Image: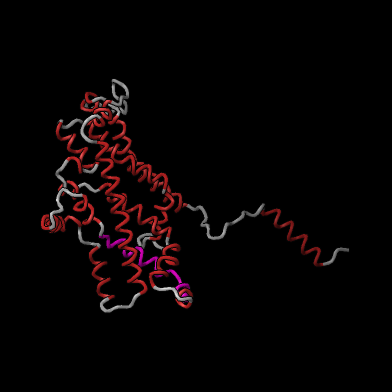
């Protein structure tokens, strides 16, 4: 005869078979419920709404000026795709010089901003000095100040230092980034202080600890901040437009706009200009999309 334990085990197996195979559940993974389906649908609609204008700009850039000005809603013009608009822009003005200026100034702004912001954030995170709390409050408050408010004072300051129509006049006003100081400080606060205490016991100074311990642990957030600063510097139009008049020192967005305005409104060339200006940023996003997403998640605005 079968024992009671064997009978119990048999009944358990039979019940489990009747219920069907169990679904494996990954720890930390939420079930795919109706709310997630709705969220995906909403996000997909928002993505389509963002992509449609960009795709329309690309389609218009490959039309002739006649097709672009005709008001035809078709994605492909009556004359078929053409690169006339791109050829016209690349053959006019100092496009390659403007692109090089944009690259040099954006890289310089990124490096200087990263250095200043990292040092300031580490000081606020680890050092205890008089007025530290109130000074950090001022930095946080300055985040909500629109940059356009400072345009006139900055321009007069550049005039006073004879920096108008110079690379330094273009770079220096863009290297102060309070938001990046806040982001980096928040990350530095999460680094265990015990690591620095151990290095201090071994005789390491403050700068040595910052260079050898804090910065290597902060590579992901530093990369994210660098990408954000570079994108902002590359896209900046207003300040370079005001402070630079020499065509050989113009950045790509400003230089391309002067070409368009000199020849009147030509819609295909306007869209080709937008595509050319955005192309380097699209390449950067494709290469560093993981760092950008991680930076948004750990920046303090998306949660950590």
Query: Where residue 135 appears, x then y in whole percent?
Result: 25, 72
Residue 223 on the magenta segment: no
Magenta segment's dominant SS is helix
Query: Where residue 184 appears, x then y in whole percent?
Result: 36, 64
Q: Residue at 24% of width from left, 55% of height from top?
A: 174
Q: Which residues are magenta?
A: 176-197
Q: Residue at 28% of width from left, 75% of height from top?
A: 132
Q: Residue 283, relative to residue 76: is it above or below?
A: below
Nearest the viewer among 123 and 185 is: 123
Nearest the viewer among 293 and 56 is: 293
Q: Among all residues in the image, which is located at the extreme front?
A: 203
Q: Quadrant of residue 254?
A: top left
Q: Residue at 29% of width from left, 24% of height from top?
A: 77
Nearest the viewer among 225 and 68 is: 225
Say how the picture is coloured.
secondary structure
Q: Residue at 15% of width from left, 42% of height from top?
A: 246
Query: Where residue 201 appears, x then y in whole percent?
Result: 47, 78
Q: Quadrant of the C terminus?
A: bottom left
Q: Quadrant of the N terminus?
A: bottom right
- Relative placement, left or right, of 186 versus 254 is right
Residue 195 on the magenta segment: yes
Query: Where residue 198 appears, x then y in whole percent?
Result: 48, 75
């Amino acid at each position: 005869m079968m024992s009671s334990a064997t009978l119990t085990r048999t009944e358990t197996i039979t019940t489990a078979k009747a219920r069907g195979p169990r679904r494996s559940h990954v720890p930390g993974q939420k079930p795919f419920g109706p709310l997630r389906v709705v969220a995906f649908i909403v996000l997909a609609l928002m993505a389509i709404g963002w992509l449609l204008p960009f795709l329309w700009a690309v389609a218009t850039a490959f039309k002739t000026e006649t097709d672009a000005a005709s008001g035809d809603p078709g994605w492909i013009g009556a004359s078929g795709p053409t690169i006339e608009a791109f050829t016209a822009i690349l053959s006019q003005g100092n496009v390659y010089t403007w692109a090089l200026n944009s690259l040099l100034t954006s890289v310089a702004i990124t490096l200087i901003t990263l250095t200043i912001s990292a040092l300031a954030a580490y000081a606020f995170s680890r050092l205890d000095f008089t007025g530290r709390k109130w000074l950090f409050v001022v930095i946080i408050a300055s985040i909500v100040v629109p940059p356009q408010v400072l345009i006139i004072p900055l321009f007069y300051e550049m005039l006073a230092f004879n920096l108008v129509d110079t690379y330094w006049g273009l770079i220096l006003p863009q290297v102060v980034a309070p938001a990046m100081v806040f982001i980096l400080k928040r990350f530095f606060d999460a680094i265990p202080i015990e690591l620095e205490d151990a290095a201090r016991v071994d005789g390491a100074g403050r700068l040595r600890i910052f260079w050898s311990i804090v910065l290597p642990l902060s590579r992901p957030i530093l990369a994210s901040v660098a990408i954000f600063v570079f994108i902002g510097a590359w896209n900046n139009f207003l300040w370079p437009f005001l402070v630079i008049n020499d065509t050989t020192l113009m950045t790509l967005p400003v230089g391309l706009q002067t070409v368009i305005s000199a020849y009147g409104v030509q819609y295909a060339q306007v869209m080709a200009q937008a595509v050319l200006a955005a192309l380097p940023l699209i390449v950067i996003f494709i290469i560093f999309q993981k760092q950008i997403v991680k930076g948004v998640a750990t920046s303090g605005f998306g949660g950590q």
